[in-house]
Image (cartoon, rainbow, N blue to C red):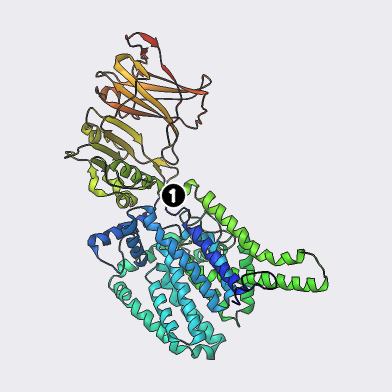
Amino acid sequence: MKLLARSHRGNWITPRWHRRLMVLALLLLGFGLRLSGVGRIPPGLYRDEAQHGLDALDILNGGGLKLYFEANNGREPLYIYLVTASVALLGRSPLAVRLPAVYVGFLTLAASYALAHAFWNRRLGRWTLATLTVTFWHVHLSHVGFRAILLPLCTALAMAQVAHGIRSGKQRHWLAAGLWYGLGWYTYTAARFTPAAVAAVILYGLCCHRHETIRLWRGALKTALVAAAILLPLGIFTVLHPDIALARVGQVSVFDPAISGGHPWRALLRQGVATVMMFTIRGDRIWRHNLAWRPVWGPAIALAFTLGLGVALARIRRDVGLAVALIWTMVMALPTTLAEDAPHFLRAVGILPTAALLPAQGLDWLYEKLSSWRRTATHRHRPAGSGHLLVPLIAPLLIVFELATTATDYFVHYAQADPVYHWFEGGPTELAGTMNAFLGVGWTGRRMQHGPSTPATVFIDEPLWESWASLPFLTDNRSIRFLPVDQPGETHGRLMFVTWPYRDWHQDVLGYLPHPAYLTVRQGPTAQGDLDPEPFTFAMITSAEPRPSVPPPLATFENGIILRAALFRRPSYRNTQPTIWLWWDVSQTLDTDYTVFVHYLRNEERIAQHDGSPGYGHLPTSSWEPGDLILDIHPMPNVRPQTGQDSLRIGLYDTQSGKGLTVVDSAGQPIADAAHIPVILAEP
């Protein structure tokens, strides 16, 4: 009853419950930031993520459990097992690979609160939770299927248990610390630097708190024994297979002459400066990890970090928690300092749980100083009005400002940036969705389909299939066949051919197209590798389907060529152009190749034009047969339709002579030199 009693200020909630509700609100905010747009932001599915999905499929198909996954330069297994459970529940989709990261990120928020609480008190736990909640770096890590997301969670939990063990002396905390520390080695390669961090912390303890540190040896031994037992299988694997477990380390070392240019110490100094700058000045340039060059924290939390760093340096000898935060952050920054491309936010991920403690200290220091100043000012100048009461809100407002900055940078600037689409291989991911939509099964880019409506087969160039891991992960290969083939075999129903545009693929495709059929050739999405100067179309998509019902003719040309429909269509894929889609019919065999012209008119004035052979030149009119329905696509760059003002002028002319075909009436008499029709927008 006492808890529900109204206080003298009229509040129903006690301060204790108010603080608990604050923690709950921060956790819900953090979960919302991490769940929002998952599977869609960032667009695409990078090959590292897709490889996790392929390993999950291998496990689900009876491939067995592994201590270390050899593919893709070798990977620790823990996140892959989470993906396996997710794929089993949700199917083959980007969401299935990334959803575990959302929950791991959420648990890391709770663990960061527990860590600061164990080091100091609940108030600093709330500041730490608030800081990590609005940190762009951690929001992004919680949106992607990278195994690195697990290391901060295991680190924070292990540290919190050690702190509880020191305070309480209870055995269970030391044992739990060993459990979480051991599991951390099964998360991400940067865990291999944690022994150096642990050694540095112990050295600090022996130097500054010798007697207290020595008294902890029994608990530390229990932690070490549990961790060793958990690490033993991975250690045996590493000894037996060093070429697999240690291969990646040598590939990126700053001491490799290919990376350092023969000056390793100069390169190391440069890397060290870049690592220090990443917190407040300039961060990771790689779009897969960050909004390029954005520092770890925006201006608001950068200020708090600077204050917290000053507090930590001032109190480092007497405040063990601050000393541990500084030491751990410095040592766990070494994976990015000692490797190429510093700062590298994946390699530096081990600093997250301790680095977040420093802005929290700065915010707490600022809040206490401002509150003290308010109390002094109020005592000296009463009544002072409401201005003094608002001064301590400056510290919470820094969190609010960082929240606004992070939300805008991530969900607007980062999510819509073209480099993000390409660095996460959005084009191949969209192609997989297109193939699945054609097959009638799997993830289409918008939803999951659970069964084909009609039989369908997709033929694809094998090098394309092997170039992007998202294709074999997202697409069920039971309906996939590779080009070139001698005989298409049993291919009843609908056919799709996905080919590399920069080779002569006509012989592999056009000879297998059935007639009559609904035939289309269209450009696939674009891709851009890390070293490519600009995006390029990496696939042509040819399909043959049963002829659907067709509308009455829009126009009939000489020689039995019929224009059935014309639509303006917005880009089908990201970074592609608006197009005009034309549907042609033919009542007789044609011996001549004709070029189609499309004039885009606004108030009868031409503003855009495209001339080209049908099907991007791959379905010439001489290949048409009676009964075929041909989809013919013409790009209209930079055109934005205006209803009621725009129209199309469409016609054909002989590619060799330039002589145009006329539009004829039902009696075959010429009536116009081109079809003139209004612009109709295609349904999205």
**Residue for point 51% across, 75% down:** 115
Q: Quadrant of residue 194?
A: bottom left
Q: Quick check: 505 above or below 315?
A: above
Q: Quick check: 116 above or below 273?
A: below
Q: In terms of depth relative to the viewer, which is nearer, 635 or 669?
A: 669
Label 1, secondary structure: give it: loop
Q: In terms of depth relative to the viewer, which is nearer, 614 or 669?
A: 669
Q: Position of residue 577 (x, y in %)?
A: 45, 35
Residue occupied by mark 1? 43
Compared across the picture, whether 318 is left or right of 137 comes to: right
Q: Quick check: 621 above or below 242?
A: above
Compared across the picture, whether 330 is left or right of 99 comes to: right
Q: In terms of depth relative to the viewer, which is nearer, 376 or 458?
A: 376
Amino acid marked by disc 1: Pro
Q: Position of residue 93 (x, y in %)?
A: 35, 52
The answer to whether residue 109 is visible is yes
Q: Quadrant of residue 635?
A: top left
Quadrant location of the C terminus in the rendered image:
top left
Q: How many marks?
A: 1
Q: Quadrant of residue 262?
A: bottom left
Q: Position of residue 622 (x, y in %)?
A: 27, 22
Quadrant location of the N terminus in the rendered image:
bottom right
